[in-house]
Amino acid sequence: MGPLGATCEELLETWFGLRTLLVSSCTHALEMAALLLDLQPGDEVLLPAFTFVSTANAFVLRGVRPVFVDVDGSGNLDVAAAAALRSRRTRAVCAVHYAGNSCDLDALAAALPGLPLVEDAAQAIGATFRGRPLGTRGVAGAISFHETKNVGCGEGGALGLPRPDLVERAEFIREKGTDRRKFSQGLVDKYTWVDIGSSYVLSELNAAYLEPQLRALERIQARRAQVFARYRQALAVPSARAGARIIEPPEHNGAGNAHLFALVFRSPEQRTRYIAQMGASGILTPFHYVALHRSPMGRRFHDGRPLPISDQLTDCLVRLPLFFNIADTQVDEVIDRTLEFLRAL
Ligand SMILES: Cc1ncc(COP(=O)(O)O)c(C=O)c1O
């Protein structure tokens, strides 16, 4: 990590208001969080079933059993369901801020008192919960700069560290378990092996790509918000009339970060037809996660409880094109084709 990486960290720290480590991916940020929690084989971590594999893998790598919790209609952890699944083996809860929309972190803290929280804020750069940046509330907050995110550098991420007592150890873990950072700061004569760790530093080449985007964060978010608002204004009512719905930022999120615009259809068949019809016009409308309890690996851990909303989002959700440099004419084209589809339902 060189001067551009350091600048990225400064920009992130200004936004988060706390020590934030630039790392090689959100997957790695989550692995670091799991290491910081000192989890042991046999421990359990509560996490949503409707998420990306990295949310679970980070803990499974430590021998932990992921306990899959259903989500609510917004795609976020169902707080009451999480509380009901707490057992004497539960060591942490990992909340994913789906679509950059936060789950109700106050309700979560009240329902799971004393339980360490890891925030998987992969999609949540620039988003807030009651005015506070997502990723700053728990033991650690993991952000992604994968190319699909609002701000991206191919592969990259950040780990927000709200607890000052964990910062030094996180720096060791990021640097292969060494005190190399202290060496770079002139605090020790040579660096050495002090803890477990891995290679979690972001390359300076990626930082060079990331830095101008972090500086342009407001402009990026503003354009995305415009596109989101245009889709919403044109599609919310016609979707509801056709029995579909859009994923909206909950009130506690303020404006959200317009990470994605998603439609949830009434049936998998409707979604399949929509994707095919849009595809025929050259418009890509991908679905999203396959809920983890339905994956071959997830089935090894899951106790068979039904997780109906995670199933529904797996089967019925699609994402509309939403990126910084999408042209207004393209947005209009997506809207027109979608309205045609909805009217025919
Ligand atoms: C919820 C969630 N967590 C973690 C990740 C992993 O992020 P990365 O690709 O930066 O490792 C993703 C990736 O999209 C994600 O959606």
Image (cartoon, rainbow, N blue to C red):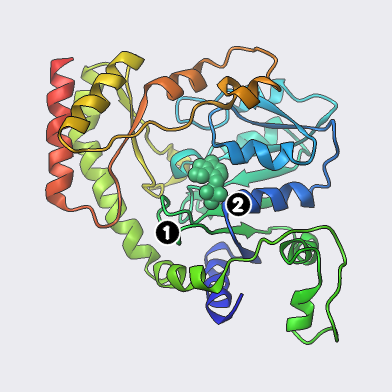
**For residue 117, what is the image quadrant?**
top right
For the C terminus, give its image quadrant.
top left
Q: Which mark is residue 151?
A: 1
**For residue 250, what is the image quadrant?**
top left
Side of 151 where 299 appears, left or right: right
For the N terminus, give its image quadrant.
bottom right
Q: Residue at x 42, y 54 (%)?
A: 147
- Give SS at disc 2: strand
As shown in the figure, which amino acid type bears the numbered disc 2? Answer: Ala
* Structural distance between the alpha carbons of marks 1 and 2: 14 Å
Q: Does residue 117 sit above or below 213 in this rendering?
A: above
Q: Neighbour class for label 2 at 10 Å: few (<14), some, many (≥20)?
A: many
- x and y percentages locating residue 186 in the rendered image: 78, 87
Q: Neighbour class for label 1 at 10 Å: few (<14), some, many (≥20)?
A: many
Q: Is mark 2 within 8 Å of ligand 1?
A: yes
- x and y percentages locating residue 200 in the rendered image: 66, 61
- x and y percentages locating residue 123 in the rendered image: 48, 47
Q: Which mark is residue 65?
A: none
User: Disc 2 designates what residue?
Assistant: 142
Side of 250 where 50 appears, left or right: right
Of the two numbered discs 1 and 2 on the same chain, state the one appearing first in sequence.
2
As shown in the figure, which amino acid type bears the numbered disc 1? Answer: Val
Q: Does residue 205 sit above or below 325 in this rendering?
A: below
- x and y percentages locating residue 317 in the rendered image: 37, 26
Residue 214 visible to the viewer: yes
Foreground residue among 45 and 218 = 45
- Give SS at disc 1: loop
Q: Does residue 88 sit above or below 167 in this rendering?
A: above
Q: Residue at x 31, y 14 (%)?
A: 269
